[in-house]
């Protein structure tokens, strides 16, 4: 398609290579991604707004890569926030996708996935949501994730909380619990406690084991999304064959859907102009004190796994005979 055609320019963004396959094995074109993000902008931008954005971009013939730092060639009109990254000891300039024009610019860069923090701007100390990430052992075990989600909802209700659920766009589910001005430490603690309570309901089905080899055929209830971690946004496409979408699902419909039902080709028609994520989201809630207190007594999964690994290495080293033995 020749450059300069009217449909190659939207909101001041000039597009290129629209009729190429989006990425190797995608089964859809770059145009279809752009059309999807354009029609979904009024629902996707609100869940991205003011949240530091990381994208996964895919170029033809290359592996997907995550981009956190806004590239130097990005236009000046894209808002951004500078955040100190403790792990890499550097300042990262994150984009804020606050309007359709910015979203379309990212689409033109072949940004397929949109991952955001649970905090707004540079206020890392007050997440707006707690999140449980339910990760089944394989793509064909989605029904196990559904069973754990039902149990998680039971735990939420017993704890006096409410939440919403969406497909991850991959093989699992994300449960979001909106919280009211809680500290990052308390949100992280409450999330650990919720995960532990879900695990206790059926330890043969669900596990909080951070080390993959320790999970077996159980669903991993991941409580580590608090703090600076990101989660793929509702309505975001995923860089997988067919380009599935992370999609909100009513609790009552969980056992009637599969992640493959929701793609950039099917979602606009399914929604029919609605915003299911915004409509289902409860108002922010206070975290119960007993939940927070319980969580503060549970080790952070990633840290506990790291210490356990070090102990195993030390033990293995202690059992190794000296070279001359």
Image (tube, rainbow, N blue to C red):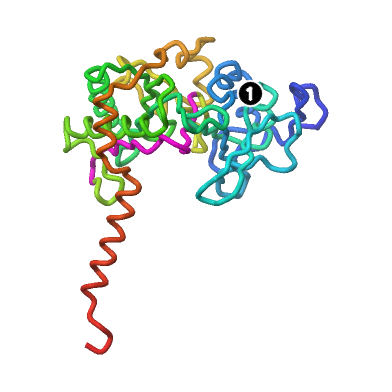
Q: Is residue 21 visible?
A: no
Write down the region rendered in magenta: 216-234
Q: Is residue 64 visible?
A: yes
Instruction: Check disc 1: other Cα within 10 Å, few if <14, some if 14-19, many if 20+.
Output: many
The quadrant holding residue 12 is top right
Q: Is residue 224 left or right of residue 45?
A: left
Q: Is residue 207 above or below residue 191?
A: below
Q: Is residue 198 above or below residue 178?
A: below
Residue 210 in the image: state x and y as whole percent: 31, 46
Per the image, the residue denoted by label 1 is 98
Residue occupying image coordinates x 36% and y 25%: 175
Q: Is residue 128 left or right of residue 323?
A: right
Pick whichever, 153 or 189, lies toward us.
Answer: 189
Q: Is residue 199 left or right of residue 48?
A: left
Residue 322 in the image: state x and y as whole percent: 25, 83
Residue occupying image coordinates x 29% and y 31%: 145
Specify the quadrant that holds the N terminus.
top right
Residue occupying image coordinates x 75% and y 34%: 75
Q: Is residue 304 magenta?
A: no
Residue 25 in the image: state x and y as whole percent: 53, 41
């Amino acid at each position: 398609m020749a450059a300069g055609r009217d449909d190659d320019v939207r909101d001041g963004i000039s597009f290129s290579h629209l009729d190429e396959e989006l990425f190797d094995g995608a089964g859809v074109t770059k145009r279809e991604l752009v059309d999807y993000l354009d029609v979904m902008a009024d629902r996707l931008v609100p869940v991205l707004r003011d949240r530091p954005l990381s994208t996964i971009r895919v170029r033809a013939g290359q592996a997907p890569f995550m981009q956190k730092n806004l590239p130097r060639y990005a236009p000046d009109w894209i808002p951004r926030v500078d955040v100190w990254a403790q792990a890499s000891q550097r300042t990262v300039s994150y984009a804020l996708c606050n309007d359709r024009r910015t979203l379309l610019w990212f689409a033109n860069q072949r940004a397929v996935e949109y991952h955001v923090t649970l905090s707004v701007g540079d206020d890392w100390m007050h997440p707006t949501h707690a999140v449980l990430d339910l990760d089944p052992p394989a793509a064909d075990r989605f029904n196990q994730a559904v069973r754990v989600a039902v149990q998680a909802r039971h735990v939420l209700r017993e704890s006096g909380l409410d939440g919403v659920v969406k497909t991850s766009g991959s093989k699992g589910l994300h449960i979001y619990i909106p919280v009211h001005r809680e500290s990052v430490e308390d949100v992280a603690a409450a999330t650990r406690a919720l995960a532990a309570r879900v695990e206790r309901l059926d330890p043969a089905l669900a596990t909080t084991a951070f080390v993959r080899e320790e999970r077996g055929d159980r669903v991993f209830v991941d409580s580590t999304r608090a703090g600076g971690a990101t989660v793929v946004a509702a309505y975001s496409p995923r860089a997988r064959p067919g380009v599935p979408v992370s999609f909100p699902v009513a609790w009552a419909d969980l056992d009637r859907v599969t992640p493959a039902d929701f793609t950039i080709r099917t979602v606009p028609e399914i929604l029919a102009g609605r915003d299911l994520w915004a409509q289902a989201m409860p108002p922010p809630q206070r975290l119960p004190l007993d939940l927070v207190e319980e969580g503060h007594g549970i080790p952070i999964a990633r840290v506990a796994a790291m210490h356990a690994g070090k102990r195993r290495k030390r033990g293995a080293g202690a059992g190794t005979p000296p070279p001359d033995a």
